[in-house]
Image: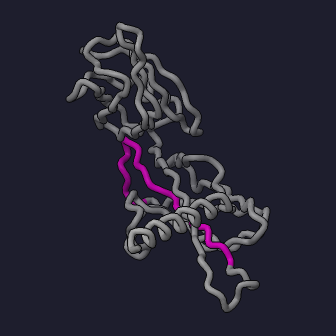
Amino acid sequence: MKQIICHLIAALLSACLFSSSALAGITITGTRIIYPAAEKEVTVRLNNRADRPALVQAWIDDGDAHQALDKIDVPFVLLPPVSRVEAHKGQTLRLIYTGHNQAATKESVFWLNVLDIPPTDKKLAGKNQLQMALRSRIKIFFRPGSLSEEGAKQAAAGLIWRKGSKSDRLTASNPSPYFVNVSRVTVDSLSGRQLTTQRGEMLAPGATQEFTLHGGALTQIKPDIHYQYLDDYGAARSVDSQLTQ
């Protein structure tokens, strides 16, 4: 009986999560934010696609999604931190860099958080209600003045690929001062089988990241590496490279 109740609770929670996702109203325009150091501010547009108003809370963190808001220390001011967005209307968020010391020779990454808080249904006043606030997060890349969009493209095309620690893995090294988001990696075996990744990874400046490929071992593969990265606008770009011995 206890097991049946647990299954029913799990099913109910899954249904609630699915319904909430389907009814999510607040969307962020774009999938990432590039903040050039020379800009006084950068704006981000929110849109409410729902038929009801929403209370929106927004904040920026440095990567810890669970950190308390009063403990977060980032070099940005975000305005407005709380706003009401009417049905089918929008809201513009202003990101203002405060000039705190950031690395002048490489990019830094932060996260924009947007919490969509739905209103209470007055028709259900006095009854039990399950209210679910939905949070969206996208990356903010702070780019020093010495770096450029063209440099970011060159960095993404300049990854160094080697065989990894196991027979189904490759490693990519990023010698550049930019973050590179790799969304897909593909290699071909000598027998014609294609090996590919099932998840992407973000390489920090100067970092090395390992990728697991599915479809077979890398013992008999061609030296050609095909991968996709996400550019400043979130679009997938293809690169052909070579395996370094």
| Nearest the eye: 109 or 39 | 109
Give the left or right position of residue 145, taking residue 53 as reference: left
Give the left or right position of residue 112, taking residue 122 as reference: left
Residue drawn where x is 46% and y is 49% of the image? 142
Report the magenta residues as a range.
100-119
- What percent of the width, then of the height, locates residue 128? 61, 85
Give the left or right position of residue 102, taking residue 43 as reference: left
- What percent of the width, then of the height, locates residue 95? 57, 60
Q: Is residue 64 covered in magenta?
A: no
Q: Is residue 111 covered in magenta?
A: yes
Residue drawn where x is 67% and y is 56% of the image? 45
Q: Quadrant of residue 72?
A: bottom left
Q: Quadrant of residue 84?
A: bottom right
- What percent of the width, then of the height, locates residue 175? 32, 30
Residue drawn where x is 61% and y is 73% of the image? 82
| Nearest the eye: 143 or 156 | 156
- What percent of the width, then of the height, locates residue 159? 37, 26
| Nearest the eye: 104 or 131 | 131
